[in-house]
Amino acid sequence: MPEGDTVWNTARVLHRALAGARITSSDFRVPQLATTDLTGWTVRESASRGKHLLLRLDAPDNAPWTLHSHLRMDGAWRAYAPGERWTGRPAHLIRVVLRSPGAVAVGYHLHEMALVPTAEENQLVGHLGPDLLGADWDPAEAVRRLADDPEQIIGAALLDQRNLAGVGNLYKCEVLFLRGVSPWAPVGAVPDLPGLVALAQRLLAANRGRWTQSSTGSLHRGQTTYVYGRRAQPCRRCGTAIRKEELGERVTYWCPVCQPEQPGSPTTG
Ligand SMILES: [Zn+2]
């Protein structure tokens, strides 16, 4: 599941493959960029901001531009050596191909693709809260934004990228389990919000640089999470069956014993 750490990793892959390279051909397969041609442009750097990818380029006239993409649930970028077989995803999911002398970057099922002057990046990412993996990570500001809506349930507030940028559904479920907080608890009732935010940051940071996301410390298949994806399996702490319910537009996983329920949750509501 693409969360902040996956996007951070993806940005690094693109950076290693393309930074400093001149684009020898580009092939955009999305309507809004169908006529865009980046041939002769130079890749300056690749960066992430929350779950957004920012590929920064210099046009032939040296003007700085940013190619923005978002992975949402299912997008991916892959970098291949020239001539290497593309094994990432089916070809019909390809949204862009960028070729350089040393690498081919292929974007699959990307969303929100846009090419904007770098000076206008903020139109695309300026709404985001502090980036958990950003150089300018500001935990106090993230806590302030979360606490700004004390009635909001924490399971939704953590996913709201305007509060803090980078937490997706997996880390949301895991952080709430580790802190013993019900996903349905109002933000105002969460004890030690700064501790919860700090844990979310540590989990994402610990998973940088690898593709297997783990909150347990184990990288063994089936042992990487406490609750996420473990419906009806026994809680690793108390043995109670893990529950799965809809929460807003997403599902959430939790242990009804380790995370005591709140008024309004599906079983007490
Ligand atoms: Zn439990």
Image (cartoon, grey):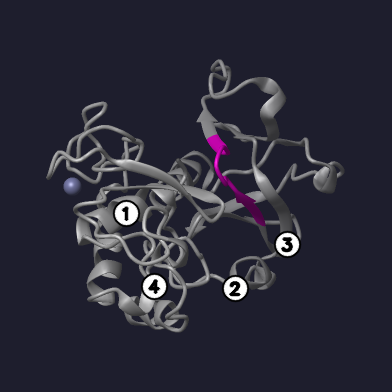
Q: Which kind of residue does numbered mark 2 sit on?
A: Gly
Instruction: Using the image as rendered, state which of residue 256 and residue 190 is in the foreground.
Output: 256
Residue 8 placement (x, y as % from top left): 42, 51
- The circle on residue 116 is 3
- The circle on residue 186 is 4
Mark positioned earlier in the residue sequence (4 or 3): 3
Crowding near pointer 3: few (<14 within 10 Å), some, many (20+)?
some
Say which quadrant the N terminus sits in. top left
**In this rendering, the label closer to the viewer, 4 or 3:** 4
What secondary structure is found at the residue carrying circle 1? helix
**In this rendering, the label closer to the viewer, 1 or 4:** 4
Say which quadrant the C terminus sits in. bottom left
Q: Are discs 1 and 3 less than 8 Å apart at CB?
A: no
Residue holding disc 2: 126
Q: Are discs 1 and 4 less than 8 Å apart at CB?
A: no
Residue holding disc 1: 204
The residues colored magenta run 67-77
> With respect to residue 153, does 174 lie above or below?
above
Mark positioned earlier in the residue sequence (2 or 4): 2
Question: Image point 34% across, 51% down: which residue?
Answer: 173
Q: Which kind of residue does numbered mark 3 sit on?
A: Val
| Quarter of the rendering containing residue 58 | bottom right
**In this rendering, the label closer to the viewer, 2 or 4:** 4
